[in-house]
Image (cartoon, grey):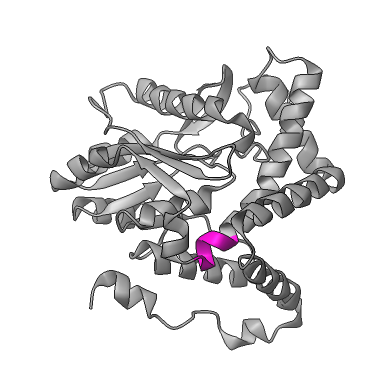
Amino acid sequence: MSTHQQIAHTAFPVPWRRIANPANWPLLLGLGLLRLLTLLPVSAQQVLGAWLGRGFELLGTRRRHVVETNLRLCFPHLDSQQRRRLQHDHFAALGCGLLETALAWWGSDARLRKLVTVEGLEHLAQAQASGRGVMLLTAHFTHLELGARFMTQLHSFHAMYRPHRNPLYQDMMRYYRERRSGQRAIPQNDIRATIRALRRGDTVWYAPDHNYGRQSIFVPFFGVPAYTITATARLAEMSNAQVVPYYPIREPDGRYRLVIEPALTQFPSDDLEADTVRVNQLIERWVQQAPEQYYWVHRRFKTRPPGQPRLY
């Protein structure tokens, strides 16, 4: 039995004591509702998701402030009306992302294959043929889970994950990521497991664009100093892995495009800061294609250079 089959048939990992805990029932009810909604046509899911996102915008004062701040910093050339429009579109995309996560967890392969167009598959094949490990470099888009699910249809990989404060949700997230990706998920702070996997020639999914607060330096992100993790170059150096960038885009017609770019050349270099800048510039280019689809609710600039005031 293959690794993918072994993981796909692993027993559901949530202990019954968590399911029986009344504190977890609202989460289970919400997830059950999301699973039912995946039975709707994708077009209907996207309309419903957009409406949910509008509700998030109206009720989420704190997150709305984060989005407003991020857009003001990253798009100073836009006037207030344009930024407000972008903000509305972002919350709509955020709501869609909730249903897209459900689709990534519970949608069938046959259904999802009809939704996506893949560009640059040859770049992934070339990297895999080298026999070296591969880092799938991407970023946090609102449809991140669905983009990763599309990638699982092309190649198995270790999905990295950030431990969640709710153990029940974390167990379910890890279970579905492993079930679909075909490999064991790796906590983002388990550097040794990541390096071992890459040295074996495995593929690891990796998104370095959040403020992780460790092994980071200030480099520009949309012209704003952003505390950015340097691990992309460090991991590539320690494991001799190739870095293959990819990103998903939701198209105006409701379909998706998965773009796989050539493996980075001369990476890492002998300049860690320049390598980190290069990664941010990649992500900026992707974001500019569909800025509303980036995860602007994250406090990307919460860590500030010395002497600069807090933003959030």
Residue ID at (48%, 51%): 115
Front residue (pair 287, 220):
287
Residue 106 on the magenta span: yes
Specify whether 27 is left or right of 109: right
Q: Is residue 190 above or below residue 89?
A: below
Note whether residue 238 is visible. yes
Note whether residue 311 is visible. no
Front residue (pair 224, 283):
283
Where residue 292 sits: x, y (%)?
64, 33
- Pick out the residue farthest to the top: 77
Residue ID at (31%, 44%): 135
Image quadrant assignment for residue 92: top right
Q: Is residue 52 above or below residue 105?
A: above
Image quadrant assignment for residue 100: bottom right
Where residue 240 sits: x, y (%)?
20, 41
Give the magenta-colored segment's residue range.
102-107
Q: Main secondary structure of the magenta part?
A: helix
Residue ID at (41%, 34%): 230
Front residue (pair 205, 42):
42
Q: Quadrant of the C terminus?
A: top right
Specify whether 253 is left or right of 260: right
